[in-house]
Amino acid sequence: MASNTIVERVAADLAKYPPFDKLAPGVLGDLAASISVSYHEEGELLFGKDDPLKGSAFMVMKGAVRLYDLIDGQEVLVDLCDEGDVFGVRAIFGGHGYLLYAQIAEESLIYDIPVEKVKALISADAGVSMFFAAEFAKSVQDIEQTLSSALSLRRQGSSVPAASSFLEHETLEVKPVENVVTCPEDISVREAALIMAESNIGSILVTSPEGHPLGIITDTDLRKKVVAVEGPVNERPVREIMSSPVYTITGGKTVADMVMLMVKTKLRHFCITEDGTVESPVKGIISEHDIITSEGNNPAVIMKEVQAAEEVGQLKAERDKAENLLATYMGQNVAVHFMASIITEINDAIITRAIHMTLDALEKEGRGIPPVPFTWLSLGSEGRREQLLRTDQDNALIFADTGGGEREALHAYFLEFASRVTAILEGAGFVRCPADVMASNPKWCLSLTEWKDCFRHWIETPEPKAVMHSTIFFDFRPVYGEPSLAAELKRDVFESIAKGRGFLEFFAKNALQNPPPLGFFRNFMVEKSRDHANEFDIKSRAMMPLADAARVLAYQLRIPEYFGTVERFGRIGELEPALSGLCREAAAAYEFLMKLRARNGLEHSSTGRYIKPESLNKLERQMLRNVFSTIEQIQQTLNLRFQLDYFRD
């Protein structure tokens, strides 16, 4: 028989969770005395599908339990039970066996509650009866919905989603117009306009006798090339005013594909042909309107408004729209890499517009155009194309070297220029960097030679402050100006690292400063500061360890592209096949963290950095634990690769 101390502890635990929190002390004590407490290791199977029902229902007191089924040999997660969750209630209501598998997800303490005791409580207490009836109905409904969804995906030829694959949802396919209105190239402009009017369409494809696309005429073409032109144009052949060549694609494009095409090409019409080239027959056409109606959002419109903005307030308004767009995408479970691409394009457009506004203002004031080529750099998360939410600015400026004593004049010009640009960005909602890592700081507005000297100093003298700067500045990416300046700087950095053999060891050791923040039995490492007490710092505790590790390996392998963390892990896995599996896990983990932080930031109108652990659902908590495990493996890899156990300060 259990001791009174154990019974009291069990009763106290039960009293924290429904339906036991409503029981009278005597009834609760009697129930606690009948309960068995068992410890289970991760991976242990409590019961399998179709196993005979046990004489107990189960309650998780510490740890987590996965409930899943198998479809075509693949696991489909139905539920993740954690502290206070009751499962295995089928044993209470009877049946021929369990419908799911129950597996220990992490080392756990499980309370085995005798079925007969539960039945007695159900008979005596209406609240307990309603609770277990609801739990039974809910479990059946969850099983039906989850497995129906999985079977549906299987029938469609898709793979069954595991717990970690909900990050990979793609956007909807755009439905093209298949009954395309066309005309030959030798009819008159007037005839083509009449066809468009009669068909109530905004564009018409010009095709060859074989049905191949030759060009396109839009309402815009008619306004600019016909209405606004003096002299008789109407009777001229359409080939003289059509836009050519047509941008051709194959069918089956998603909203993600089409939005990125619109952003990159700045076009509004795309022709679908049999093989995706102009040398095959037309099969359909996709316009901006088709993309809008497919998705309900249009980042290309935001881009267009940003590029046309004349005031800082307009830039802020469009970035606000981008945040609303992000919230919509989050609700639709759009893939993280797509969201990051869209928001990065919008952020870059805002930076570019801020630069153009500044250049225009300086020219009007008689300050002239930039005297030498320059490059505007984004740093940190924006440099890695990962800034989903507006955080503080991290930027820098490189200007080309010149001979003579012009350096002071150049520095003064570009410092004034950078100060105006950062002020516009601040007005657009990107707050100033608290550490003043901005191009408006004289320390970070330098000539190419000065930047090379700066990076060489950090590499040759890797003291703590230099390593700290490296974690920010080594993620530089050119956004505007002469990209060759940034490319030359990156080449020089690679050469300096090759010469300064000890730098990567210091760099790697810095990447190990934040070990996986998980203690025994699900205790998250939370902050103790007054402002964020008992909150989890997702940036420093989870995202930075992965970003830091990817950066170290990227520079060791001399990866020249301006990649983000996910892309870096992808390339690292390609270059080192032995790490490919771990790199895939790390990339998926980082995308999950980006999404979790963005959702938290949108909900609380913040940067999303600090999260209350109690706000996470069961699946998110389990996913975080998987992330911590991946961080541990990545850090072990760095430790072994750079022999950091033998490395001394």
Image (cartoon, rainbow, N blue to C red):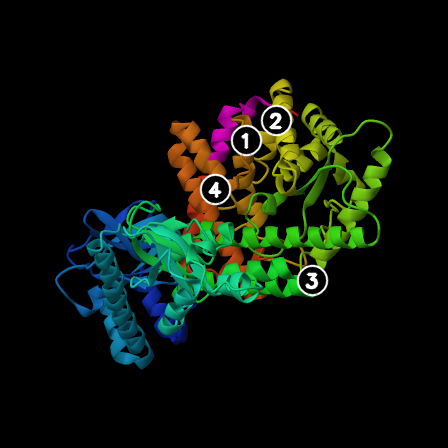
C-alpha separation, residue under disc 1 versus residue under disc 2: 8 Å
Magenta residues, start to end: 634-647
Query: Looking at the figure, which quarter contains the N terminus?
Result: bottom left
Question: Mark 3 belongs to which amino acid?
Answer: Glu
C-alpha separation, residue under disc 4 versus residue under disc 3: 35 Å
Q: Nearer the viewer, mark 1 or mark 4?
A: 1
The label on residue 566 is 4
Q: Nearer the viewer, mark 3 or mark 2?
A: 3
Question: Mark 2 belongs to which amino acid?
Answer: Arg
Left or right for 66, reference 646: left
- Mark 1 near mark 2, Cβ–Cβ under 8 Å? yes
Disc 4: CA contacts within 10 A as few (<14), some (14-19) or many (>=20): many
Q: Which SS class for mark 3?
A: loop
Which residue is denoted by mark 2 in the rendering? Answer: 491
C-alpha separation, residue under disc 4 versus residue under disc 2: 22 Å
| Lower position in the chain sequence, tag 4 or tag 3 | 3
C-alpha separation, residue under disc 3 versus residue under disc 2: 37 Å
Question: Mark 1 belongs to which amino acid?
Answer: Pro
Q: Position of residue 276 (x, y in %)?
A: 33, 47
| Lower position in the chain sequence, tag 1 or tag 4 | 1
Image-quadrant location for residue 198? bottom left
| Lower position in the chain sequence, tag 4 or tag 2 | 2
Disc 3: CA contacts within 10 A as few (<14), some (14-19) or many (>=20): some
Disc 1: CA contacts within 10 A as few (<14), some (14-19) or many (>=20): few
C-alpha separation, residue under disc 3 versus residue under disc 1: 36 Å
Which residue is denoted by mark 1 in the rendering? Answer: 560
Left or right for 250, reference 422: left
Q: Which SS class for mark 4?
A: helix
